[in-house]
Image (cartoon, rainbow, N blue to C red):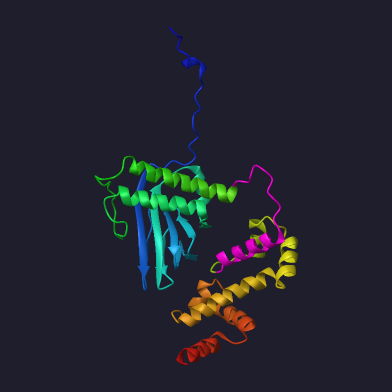
Amino acid sequence: MKKDQTEKYTPLTLDRVIKIDRIVSLHYFEYTKGFHFPGERHDFWELVYIDAGRVEVECDQKRKSLQQGNVIFHKPNEYHNIHLLDNRANAMILSFYCEDEAMEFFADRILSVHENEKWILGELLKEGRATLSDPLNIVEQYSLEVSPLAPFGGAQMIANYLEQLLISFIRSYEMKPHRPERKRSDTEMINAIIRLLSENVYQKITLEDVAFQLRLSKTTLKRLFKSKTGMSVMEYYSLLKINAAKKLIAEGELCFTEIAEQLSFSSLHYFSHKFKDVVGMSPSAYAKSVEKLSLL
């Protein structure tokens, strides 16, 4: 008879840096024109992912615009509300309890969802629809129930996907690669700069922010962008904002003050000044020209 070999083995205790044991809500909403949620605060985390359109949220008296592909985390006891900026928008909202230290990463952050996180969100939503008994578009829903037809381990899979999502976000934004990065070509760097500026057209981003996020010195950033585009980084950023403003003016849904706020200009006067610099006419003159064209 062979001797028991158990004593030779030393098991590895797994370090669970993020543990989700309780889910409070899971929603997928399709907002229509005029939607406004008055706001609330609670003692758990809330994730808001914008799947389409644009919304504005208020977090403890700070207004933040979110567009398709953005996700924001409301920390426990933070007052927050949400209202629609476009005619339509889709949002996935997931709230949960988690007291792990790693969650501090998400406080006061707006993140961009990459392909890996988008896949995880899709699988999480699919699991939620199969596991929970009620539809996911009920606004005033204060209790989740598991469906009697739920697949085996459905609730645990929701938690697993959420843990995977949170870890993926932290890895994407904080962890450095273990192997040396391939040197990026000038074209790749220009595309990365433009992509970053475009993703933040409704936010405020500085030259220092761009340099930090793309791991470039300010000197290299300014020289490279100017040499390839003929414009400075912040000139291009202003152009993106003004182009977005032209679109909002043409839509006719917002006044100039609201447009200036949505695009994070410091004041209506500064917005009007920049608009005239780029377009060659004031916002009001541009609005009249658009109106005339629509009548032709």
- Which range of residues does the magenta coloring cover? 175-201
Q: Magenta stretch containing residue 159, yes or no?
A: no
Residue 200: % across, % down: 56, 65
| Most foreground residue, 235 or 128 | 128
Residue 170: % across, % down: 54, 48
Q: Residue at x 51, y 73 (%)?
A: 261
- Residue projecting furthest to the top: 1
Q: Does residue 245 sit above or below 9 in this rendering?
A: below
Q: Say which quarter of the image contains residue 47.
A: bottom left
Q: Does residue 198 sit above or below 153 in this rendering?
A: below
Q: Does the rendering let one see residue 7?
A: yes
Q: Does residue 96 sit above or below 290 in this rendering?
A: above
Q: Say which quarter of the image contains residue 151.
A: top left
Residue 14: % across, % down: 49, 32
Q: Residue at x 31, y 60 (%)?
A: 137
Q: Say which quarter of the image contains residue 90.
A: bottom left
Q: Magenta stretch containing residue 189, yes or no?
A: yes
Q: Residue at x 50, y 72 (%)?
A: 262
Q: Judge from the rendering whether residue 150 lies leftward or rightward of residue 264; answer left or right.
A: left
- Residue projecting furthest to the left: 148
Query: How many numbered circles does the render carry?
Result: 0
Q: Judge from the rendering whether residue 128 lies leftward or rightward of residue 178; answer left or right.
A: left
| Most foreground residue, 40 or 184 | 184
Q: Does the rendering let one see residue 45?
A: no
Q: Residue at x 62, y 75 (%)?
A: 239
- Residue projecting furthest to the front: 1
Residue 161: % across, % down: 43, 46
Question: Which quadrant is the N terminus positioned in?
Answer: top left
Q: Judge from the rendering whether residue 194 lies leftward or rightward of residue 131; answer left or right.
A: right
